[in-house]
Image (cartoon, rainbow, N blue to C red):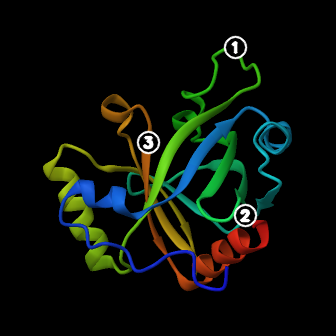
């Protein structure tokens, strides 16, 4: 894979436009190491790497909140698979998709989509969400890499939606991840 993984995103004029820009499936698990092994052994997802989260800022609404999660990213030639183990802080929005008894599981949490960069595009997207009775409930900010907003669409769709503004550094990382996995 010599080309970039992501082409320029479809402009978002309606919420359905976000589905044209899906680039990642996000799963939650009760045990990241076991989850990585499970995806490798059961599904052949051999290229999956844990990524640091220590530079991330986490927001609940617009307010900073404590948040700790272990995250791994994998691929097999294209679509990215994210695996998240909620650890502490504001992680209930992950854990509610997992078994209440704490038993091992890997469960779909979100579809991740990407959109144009910039505050103006983000503001337009949040206004579009508001017109549909939705909002960005949680945001992960990693300077120079990504702004990712989680929208709770679980009542309507059975999963969350993660809307990302991916900087070049993240696009290059995911392009390399997919290329190296093929």
Taking depth in this image into account, of 119 and 7 the one nearest to the observer is 7
Marks 2, 3: nearer the viewer: 3
On screen, 180 above or below 70? below
Compute the Cα span from label 2 to label 3: 23 Å
Q: Which residue is mark 2?
A: 54
Q: Quadrant of the C terminus?
A: bottom right
| Mark 3 residue crowding within 10 angstroms, few (<14) / some (14–19) / many (20+) | many
Counting residues from the start of the chain, the first of labels 2 and 3 encountered is 2
| Mark 1 residue crowding within 10 angstroms, few (<14) / some (14–19) / many (20+) | few
> Which residue of the protein is positioned furthest toward the top in this rendering?
101
Picture quarter containing residue 175? bottom right
Q: Which residue is mark 3?
A: 160
Counting residues from the start of the chain, the first of labels 1 and 2 encountered is 2
Judging from the image, what secondary structure is the residue with disc 1 in? loop
Picture quarter containing residue 181? bottom right
Rendering coords of residue 139 (x, y %): 47, 57
| Mark 2 residue crowding within 10 angstroms, few (<14) / some (14–19) / many (20+) | few
Q: Quadrant of the N terminus?
A: bottom right
Q: Which residue is mark 1?
A: 101
Counting residues from the start of the chain, the first of labels 1 and 3 encountered is 1
Rendering coords of residue 76 (x, y %): 71, 59
Judging from the image, what secondary structure is the residue with disc 3 in? strand
Q: Are marks 2 and 3 in contact (CB under 8 Å)?
A: no
At x 38% / y 51%, what residue is drawn? 61
At x 53% / y 39%, what residue is drawn? 109
Rendering coords of residue 129 (x, y %): 23, 53
On screen, 9 above or below 158? below
On screen, 111 above or below 76? above
């Amino acid at each position: 894979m010599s080309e970039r993984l992501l082409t320029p995103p479809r402009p978002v004029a309606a919420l359905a436009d976000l589905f044209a820009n899906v680039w990642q499936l996000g799963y939650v698990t009760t045990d990241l190491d076991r989850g990585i092994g499970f995806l490798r052994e059961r599904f052949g997802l051999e290229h999956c790497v844990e990524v640091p989260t220590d530079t991330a800022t986490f927001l609940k609404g617009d307010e900073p909140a404590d948040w700790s999660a272990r995250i791994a990213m994998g691929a097999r030639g294209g679509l990215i698979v994210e695996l998240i183990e909620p650890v502490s802080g504001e992680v209930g929005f992950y854990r509610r998709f997992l078994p209440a008894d704490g038993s091992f599981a890997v469960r779909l949490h979100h579809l991740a989509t990407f959109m144009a960069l910039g505050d103006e595009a983000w503001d337009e997207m949040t206004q579009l969400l508001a017109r549909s009775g939705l909002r960005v409930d949680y945001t992960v900010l990693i300077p120079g890499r990504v702004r990712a907003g989680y929208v709770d669409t679980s009542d309507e769709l059975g999963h969350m939606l993660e809307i990302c503004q991916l900087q070049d550094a993240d696009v290059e990382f995911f392009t390399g991840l997919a290329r190296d996995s093929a």
